[in-house]
Amino acid sequence: MSKGTVGKFILECLFIVLLGVVDSFNYSLLIIGNFVPMGINGIAVIINYIFGIESGWFSWFSLIANLPLCLLTFFLVDKGFAIKSFIYVVVLSLGVRVLQLFGLHNYAYHNSNSLIPVLISAVISGVIYGAVFKRNASTGGMDVVGKLVAYKRPELNFIWVSFAFSTIVAIAGWIVMQDLEQAFLCVIFVFVASFIGNTMLKGTRSALKVEVVTTHAREISDKIINDLHHTATVTRAEGMYHHTEYDLLICVINKRQLIELEKILKEYPDTFAYISQVTETVGLFNRAK
């Protein structure tokens, strides 16, 4: 591993530590005491409810449960992912415990069965998920389980796999605690957080791919370059109905440029185009225009 790679890994770990600290405040002020949280942390709350264990159990259970999951991920899937995920878990668990010892829970927002702490904490968690996932890490628990499942089924989105497992925990909480509203609040939290995390992970780098079948490739590509400030790729194509030769022009544009592109294409009535969503772009792509 080169010095640059090691330096980048260390910076990512430090950023993950910061996110873990922020999430510990999120749990302490908005989540604990208001609703059953998602995943392994939710399991800790359920066990606490059944056996009446003191509140610090939440922190220790998260560490104990995540250790074998992260070890399994370390040896089977991705070492860097496992290390950074466990760092996050350690910071979150110890952070919550330290904040409890300093009495931060006395300043927490307590309003059982209210959507206010659920939605606010879900937005914070969703932003944290997106930032963590972008750095090839997770927040531990069901996110690690989702990564393991996605390793066997790569076509699955591990964020939504994690959402499915966390929903099962919410249902378990309802069965054990006999409180349907708690289950609903947990599912709302998980869905909002997962949606925001997934949007951050993919939506911010999305674009549109346009494929144009035309006999005016030169004119259209010139307008795309001069007006939209993107380039295009042209290849030969054959229409199979009349065996007519055409040019197939391919370009990727920003979503907000679609109207401008449509105006360009309308100047050439014998042109046909179809547009598809691009979930991510890698490399040189101008988003400023």
Image (spheres, rainbow, N blue to C red):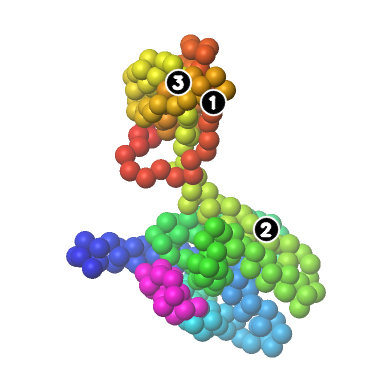
Q: Does residue 267 belong to the magenta stretch? A: no
Q: Quadrant of residue 46?
A: bottom right
Label 3 to label 2, Cα distance in Å? 54 Å
Q: Main secondary structure of the magenta part?
A: helix
Residue at the disc numbered 2: 188
Residue at the disc numbered 3: 245
Q: Which part of the image, by quadrant, shows the N terminus?
A: bottom left
Residue drawn at (60%, 82%) of the image: 55
The answer to whether 267 appears left or right of 193 in the picture is left
Image height check: is 220 above or below 230? above
Label 1 to label 3, Cα distance in Å? 9 Å
Q: Amino acid at mark 3?
A: Glu
Residue drawn at (40%, 70%) of the image: 78
Q: Amino acid at mark 1?
A: Met
Q: Residues within 10 Å of mark 3 (few under 14, many from 20)?
A: some
Label 2 to label 1, Cα distance in Å? 51 Å
Q: Residue furthest front?
A: 243
What's the magenta region? 69-88
Residue at the disc numbered 1: 240
Q: Nearer the viewer, residue 116 or 166?
A: 166
Residue drawn at (37%, 27%) of the image: 234
Return the x and y of residue 101 as percentages of the image width and height: 50, 80
Q: Amino acid at mark 2?
A: Ile
Say whether disc 2 or disc 1 marks the residue closer to the N-terminus. Answer: 2
Marks 2 and 3: in contact by CB < 8 Å? no
Return the x and y of residue 120 as percentages of the image width and height: 59, 56
Return the x and y of residue 107 as percentages of the image width and height: 56, 68
Return the x and y of residue 247 as percentages of the image width and height: 42, 23
Helix, strand or loop at mark 2: helix
Q: Nearer the viewer, residue 241 or 68?
A: 241
Helix, strand or loop at mark 1: loop
